[in-house]
Structure formats: structure tokens, C-alpha cells
Image: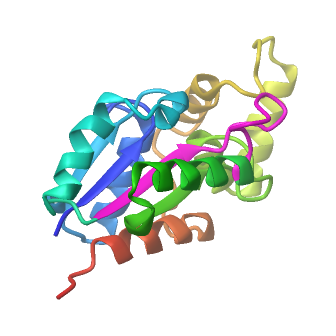
């Protein structure tokens, strides 16, 4: 059977999509069994009539998809009391899956810095850096004139790429364990 992974951004072009595919490759899992759905912004996950749900639900009914993984950013509870922060994101996604009638086949992964349980996929990636690299980026952000530097995904991503162009993320870091385990379980061969 096949798996649907719903994530923020666009299928094939987002940081979320890149990370998921990189981990699937690392785990030597069958990527051809995955249908990626780039849902755009996080708010689209909570729209019952979103086009990706209209496409996905008939595939589930026809038993062409038997597992669904929702992957969203935690974001920040201070900015959004309904959907922001790890726990709010998880609870509202679980509720949405139940409302769509797919709660029993759904798994959830909330991207964030596991130490703070807030942030986004970039926060997760940066949380895997060694302390020296984190301190360097934090120091640069502290003395820079970037606006919205606490929340800007693009700034964090670009600073990392500029500062460490040859340094790939450490996918063996403990912060990737939960996501790797979910992917392995979803894509394991079942009878």
C-alpha cells in the first residue's frame, strides 16, 4: 500500500519536502510508495475543502492510500494561540484528521526545535548544529540589522548556507530520530 505525506510548502520545492526525501533516501526506503502533497501554508491544513484533501480522500476510499503523515511547523504560540506551538499544532491536526474521517490511518510530525517545542523545519535543522556553529549564527543574528530575525525562516536558512556551504546537516542527530522512526514505520513492508 501507499503513503501520503502532507507537508507545508510545495511538493518538490520546499524545505519540508527536501528533508523528507533526504531522510527517506538515508533510510533506503521506497520513495515511489509516497505521494507528496505540498499544502502551501499551515492554515490550509485546517480547510476541509482544500484541493489536496479533495484529491486525497477518494484515494483513501479506493484503498490506494492506506497511511497519511501530516508534517507541519509548530510555529510560535505567542503569534498564534490556536495553531501555534507544538501542542496546539498537534491537537488541531489530530482533530482535523478525525473530522476528515482519516484519524485512524494518520500520523503527525511537528517540525520545531525540540528543546523549545516552537519554530519550524529550519529551527529543527539548526537545532542539530554543534554548539559552536549555533553560537556563531546566534552571534551574527544578534548584531545584525535583520528585521524579524526571531521568526524568519529564510534568514536562518540563508545564513546557514552562506556560513557552512559544504557542511550537510547531521541526519544521525537525535533530533531527527522521531521523524525517521515515523517514516520507517509508514514505509515498512506490511502483509
- Residue 13 in the image: state x and y as whole percent: 32, 31
Q: Bounds of the magenta span? A: 67-86
Please tell me which residue is depicted at 39% across the width and 33% down the height of the picture.
Answer: 39
In the rendering, at what x and y percent does residue 77 appear?
80, 38
The image shows residue 25, relative to residue 156, as above or below, that is below
From the image, which quarter does the N terminus lie in?
Answer: bottom left
**Residue 15 visible somewhere in the drawing:** yes
The reply to whether the magenta stretch includes residue 79 is yes
Main secondary structure found in the magenta portion: loop
Residue 128 position (above or below residue 181): above
Q: Residue at x 37, y 77 (%)?
A: 185
Looking at the rendered image, the quarter that the C terminus falls into is bottom left
Query: From this viewpoint, is residue 12 visible?
Result: no
60 in relation to 104, above or below: above
Q: Position of residue 10 (x, y in %)?
A: 34, 30
Quarter holding residue 149? top right
User: Which is nearer the eye, 42 or 66?
Assistant: 66
Q: Is residue 144 left or right of residue 7?
A: right
Write the residue at 19% across / 63% down: 2
Is residue 91 rendered to the left or right of residue 179?
right
Q: How is the image coloured?
A: rainbow
Q: Nearer the viewer, residue 139 or 19?
A: 19
Q: Position of residue 134 (x, y in %)?
A: 74, 46
Q: Is residue 144 magenta?
A: no
Q: Does residue 146 appear to the left or right of 65 in the view shown?
A: right
* Image point (47%, 53%), residue name: 97
Q: Quadrant of residue 184?
A: bottom left
Question: How many discs appear?
Answer: 0
Amino acid at each position: 500500500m501507499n503513503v501520503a505525506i502532507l507537508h507545508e510548502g510545495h511538493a518538490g520545492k520546499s524545505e519540508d519536502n527536501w528533508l523528507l526525501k533526504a531522510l527517506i533516501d538515508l533510510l533506503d526506503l521506497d520513495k515511489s510508495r509516497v505521494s507528496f502533497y505540498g499544502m502551501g501554508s499551515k492554515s490550509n491544513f485546517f480547510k476541509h475543502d482544500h484541493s489536496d484533501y479533495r484529491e486525497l480522500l477518494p484515494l483513501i476510499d479506493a484503498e490506494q492510500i492506506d497511511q497519511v503523515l501530516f508534517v507541519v511547523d509548530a510555529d510560535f504560540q505567542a503569534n498564534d494561540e490556536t495553531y501555534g506551538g507544538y501542542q496546539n499544532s498537534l491537537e488541531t491536526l489530530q482533530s482535523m484528521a478525525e473530522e476528515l474521517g482519516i484519524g485512524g490511518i494518520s500520523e503527525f510530525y511537528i517540525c520545531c526545535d525540540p528543546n523549545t517545542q516552537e519554530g519550524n523545519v529550519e529551527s529543527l535543522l539548526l537545532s542539530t548544529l554543534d554548539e559552536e556553529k549555533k553560537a556563531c549564527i546566534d552571534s551574527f543574528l544578534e548584531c545584525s540589522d535583520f528585521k524579524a530575525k526571531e521568526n524568519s525562516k529564510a534568514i536562518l536558512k540563508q545564513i546557514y548556507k552562506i556560513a557552512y556551504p559544504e557542511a550537510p546537516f547531521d541526519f544521525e542527530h537525535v533530533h531527527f530520530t522521531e521523524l525517521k522512526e515515523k517514516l520507517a514505520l509508514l514505509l515498512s513492508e506490511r502483509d
